[in-house]
Structures are given as structure tokens and as C-alpha cells.
Image (cartoon, grey):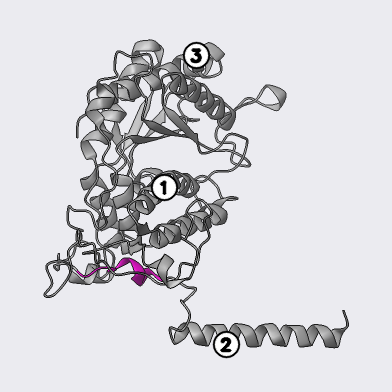
Amino acid sequence: MTRKTSLRFIMILLCVSGVLLILSKTSVLPSPFGGSARFLHTLTDPSASGSESLNSSESQQIGAPYDTDPQYPGLNTTGTESIKQWMELPIIGNDPDALDDAGESLRRWPDELSIPQLHNPDLNAIAAQNGDSQPLKGVTVILSAGRGGEDTGAIWGKGADAVMEKTILLDLAEKTGDILIKRGATVVQTRTTDESCSYFSVVAKAADVALTRYRDLAIEASYHPEPIDQLRLLMGDVIRINENSDASGGRGLFGTIGTPPQLRVLYDIEYQFADIILIHLTLGFDEDDTSVSGAQAYYMSADFVSNVNNGYAEGQDALKLPPNYTLINSAGRANLALLLKSHLARLEPMLRPVDGQESGQQIDLAVLRLSNFVSAVFEPGYLSNESDRAILTSDDGRSNIAQSIANAICQYYAYPIG
């Protein structure tokens, strides 16, 4: 192609793009862009004068969808008749400016969902399976092996005999997953190879599990999945941006303090999936004191998350920052952390709790703060300690740790609390 022809071709493309953009701005064509305002109010609050209720079958109909999905005929068509069958997913009460002034602390989102509850798992039915061969049928466990790629984590030794944290964690996650699958659970591994996976990638991959399932439920209920698709695209961006980042580095989900409207919708979706658990695996290491040994499990309650965010917001105008999220299963998180430590101590008494307490410890970790699943970071031992290291580097030792994790999850669902 000659230079003159190439220039002519480029000019034609620019002209066509300009015309399409003008048409979208004048509403002749649907806009190809979706901003954060989309998550404030898609259906007027039912308490407002002349508004429609969430249960109304006359909900607003949306314009032509931009996505394609051959699984659902008519979802990606633009004909008037095919569009009428899709209702807009109602999002209500999601405007932070409508909340009361909380003074110097961040405002708080109300303890209610901003979106329809489309999933409500029967935890009692899962608990009734306790004596079965597959007691975790209906449960999904997201296992996150920490570190990976260039982020080796702690290393003990040198050369060919060196032991790396990332390798131990990957094998531990695989062993745990195998046991959980035999017990009927669906297992999602955030990494299955020696690849980098930052905290932000972990929470984005975990979020997509709930988003994908909620999307299917929304379509079954005749809601168009556009806002869910936008969130999935955002999660894809987070994974892509952080794919070469260290486990503690990279960019957060929305780069702000508190919970903006988009993130609240995501948390409201994850809240509905009490049948999903997220466990991030890591190891302890203390090069200054190799006598430190034992297990620890970390979690974050709703109050702890709020206090952390309020601390980050100190010195700033709280009204200009997003509110704190409140629908967090604090009791469930605390129980999971406790069970992980106590069950490991039963199978591997040498891996007793590092702090002498069965209960977990609250600490600010992005992988816990930026997810609304029942979750815990589990640290079964210290690679820097000779006794712990002997267990962690042993195939039988890792098998026992994996067994203890599976036992903890089984007990969590056998006696649900929170």
C-alpha cells in the first residue's frame, strides 16, 4: 500500500469514528462508554415521590447492548423487539452524597444491598451434608498460593538446595485443592504455575468468580448484564495492570480510600455468595530470630476495615471520600481464621499457633480488605525456623497442612455462624 493510499485510509477511519461519536452523543446510537455514574442510580429510589419499586416489572428498559454472548440469543441484537425483554439491573441508594455527614470519619453505606439478591445459598443444607462423603458439595473455595514469578518470597539456603516460599505454597495449594475436590467442593486456584500474582490480581480473580455467576443469574431473571460486564472488564484491567507486580505492589481496585459506588456493587454481589471462601497462603520468615515458629491466620472484621480506612483518611475531607462498606461477615471471617489454626495444631502439633492463641489476628492486608468474601490469610509456619522448615519442606508435612485446611473448611460449613 502506498503512503498516499495509507493516509487516505486513515482519514476515512477518522471521519467514520467522528460521525459515530457524534451520533452516540446525540443518543442516535448508544454510547460505547460506561462511567462510574452508571453505578449510582439506575432505578430511582422507591422511597422517592413517583418512583418505581425494585419489584416492578415495568423497570426501565436499556438501550442496545454493546457485548456479544452467543449463549444468550437476543442479548447482543439491536432490534426493538429483542431489547424489550431485558430489564435494566436496578441499583438503588448508591449515591454517597445522599448519606448523612459522619463528621471527621468516613460515612458508612447502609446495611442493605444496592442490587437485587439473586443468590441466597442454603447453608443449612450444606451443613446437613456433614456426614456425607462429599460434605462440601455446593461450596467453592478460592485458593491463592502467594508469591510467584520473580517474587520468590522467602528463600532458605543457596544454589540447587535453596528452598523458596513460592514453590512450597504452590504445592500446598495443589494438595489442598485435591482434597477439597474429593470432598465435593469446587476449587479455583489463582495461580497454577510459577507466575506472578499480586494481592490485587488475587482479589480481582476472586471477584470474577462471583461476577460470572451473578451475571448468569441476572440474565435468567431477565436483567441485562451491562453493569456486571463493566465490573468484569475492570477486574480484567486490574489483573493486566498487576500481572508483573510484586505481591504487595501494583494498583488497587479503584485507587481510593473507602468504598466507591462501583466497588460497593461488587461487594454486594460477593456478599450474596456465602458459599464461596477465599484463602490466601503465605509463610512466615524472621531472619533476626529463627526461634520464632508456628502458625498464624489473619482476617479483617467490618469494624477493623472501617478503622483502617478512617486512618488512611485522616487529615482529609471525609465528605470527599467514599463511605465505608458495612455488609461484611465479621463473625464468619473470625471463625474461619480460628478453625485454620486449631485444625493445623491437631494434625501437626509442632505447628502450634505462633502467638499461643487459637483465634486469628486482625491485620491490614489488601487481599483481605479489598474482597467481601469470607476470607483469611493462612501462614502455617516459618521457613526460617528449623522445626517448621522440616515440616514445610516435607511432602508428608504439606499433606497434613492441606488436610487441616480442608478439615477447617468442612467444620466451618458444618456449623455455620455469622
Q: Which residue is mark 2?
A: 19
| Sequence-earlier tag: 2 or 3 | 2
What is the secondary structure assignment of the residue under circle 3? helix
Marks 2 and 1 sit apart, C-alpha to C-alpha, by 37 Å
- The kind of secondary structure the magenta stretch mainly shows is loop
Is residue 377 found left or right of 98 in the rendered image?
A: right
The circle on residue 397 is: 3
Labels 2, 1: front one = 2
The mark nearer the N terminus, 1 or 3, is 1
Location of residue 197 (image quadrant)? top right
- Structural distance between the alpha carbons of marks 2 and 3: 65 Å
Does 359 sit above or below residue 200? above
**The residue under label 2 is which amino acid type?**
Val
Residue on which the image places disc 1:
207
Of tags 2 and 3, the one toward the viewer is 2
At x 25% / y 26%, what residue is drawn?
A: 125
Looking at this view, name the residue that lies furthest to the front.
Answer: 81
